[in-house]
């Protein structure tokens, strides 16, 4: 008679507090650690990804396309202005877009905003150290990652990985939450929880999101509930 009450008690605890705090150090640190090691570095992480490049300076555009091809990406379109970039993205439906922040006809931020609104592909923005105010505008427009000029071939894969990972997170949140306002609030909470997990548990950004997503699925909770629990139970430390 004492056997049945015991499973019931842990379930209640798991839904509130225990589900979030005790499990991450062992389950997350061991499993995903093997995945990130292969994705960012080799051709496996980039191979097959289709890219549209948008840059008004021809030499930079050609160099960027060549670097991407050598890294295993497939460059399916090259644009010299923002309007052309949007048209190429709509035509080719690439996996990722890399575009300069300042371009003629239609600037990169406005182009990124149009691409983001139609949910076609994540945008990686080329920018410079002196363009901090533009970076803020680009984030508001939905840009997923940045590459700072001057860049090298080694800078490309990490930025693309971050952009595609954040894009997948956005899609997951959209699948869970229909209301736009609630989705934005959930994304803010998830981003804050990711930061805490990254600091406290030494996880990558992608692994922190996977942990939130997996915990939500395992406990049959929403990602917002898991994120709020992380924020309240594992406050960020400076």
Image (cartoon, grey):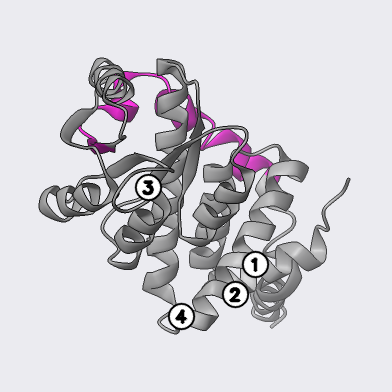
Q: Which residue is mark 1?
A: 189
Mark 4 or mark 1, which is nearer the start of the sequence?
4
Measured Cα–Cα span from mark 1 to mark 4:
14 Å
The residue tagged 3 is: 123
Would you identify the image quadrant in which residue 113 lies? bottom left
Percent of width and height locating residue 47: 24, 27
Q: Position of residue 33 (x, y in %)?
A: 54, 31
Residue at the farthest left position: 91
Which region is colored magenta? 25-53
Indicate whether 83 appears above or below 185. above
Q: Residue at x 26, y 25 (%)?
A: 58
CA neighbours of label 3 inside 10 A, class few (<14), some (14 to 19), many (20+): many
Q: Residue 90 occupies which quadrant of the picture?
A: bottom left
Q: Nearer the viewer, mark 1 or mark 4?
A: 4
- Mark 1 vs mark 3: which is more N-terminal? 3
Separation of marks 3 and 2 at Cα, in angstroms: 22 Å
Q: Mark 2 and mark 1 in contact (Cβ < 8 Å)?
A: yes
Identify which residue is drawn at 47% across, 29% down.
158
Image height of 89 relative to 74, above or below: below
Q: In percent of the image, x 71 and y 75: which residue is there? A: 16
């Amino acid at each position: 008679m004492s056997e049945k009450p015991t499973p019931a008690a842990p379930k209640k605890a798991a839904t509130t507090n225990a589900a979030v705090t005790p499990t991450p150090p062992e389950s997350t640190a061991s499993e995903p650690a093997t995945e990130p090691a292969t994705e960012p570095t080799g051709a496996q992480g980039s191979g097959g990804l289709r890219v549209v490049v948008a840059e008004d300076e021809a030499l930079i555009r050609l160099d960027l396309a060549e670097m991407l091809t050598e890294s295993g990406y497939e460059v399916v379109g090259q644009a010299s202005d923002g309007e052309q970039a949007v048209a190429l993205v709509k035509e080719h439906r690439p996996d990722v877009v890399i575009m300069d922040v300042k371009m003629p006809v239609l600037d990169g931020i406005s182009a990124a905003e149009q691409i983001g609104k139609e949910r076609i592909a994540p945008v990686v923005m080329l920018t410079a150290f002196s363009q901090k105010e533009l970076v803020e505008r680009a984030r508001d427009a939905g840009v997923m990652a940045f590459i700072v000029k001057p860049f090298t071939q080694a800078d490309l894969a990490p930025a693309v990985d971050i952009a595609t990972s954040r894009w997948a997170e956005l899609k997951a949140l959209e699948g869970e939450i229909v209301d736009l306002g609630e989705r934005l609030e959930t994304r803010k909470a998830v981003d804050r929880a990711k930061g805490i997990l990254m600091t406290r548990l030494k996880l990558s950004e992608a692994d922190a999101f996977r942990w939130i997503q997996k915990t939500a699925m395992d406990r049959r909770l929403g990602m917002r509930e898991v994120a709020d629990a992380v924020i309240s139970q594992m406050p960020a430390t400076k």
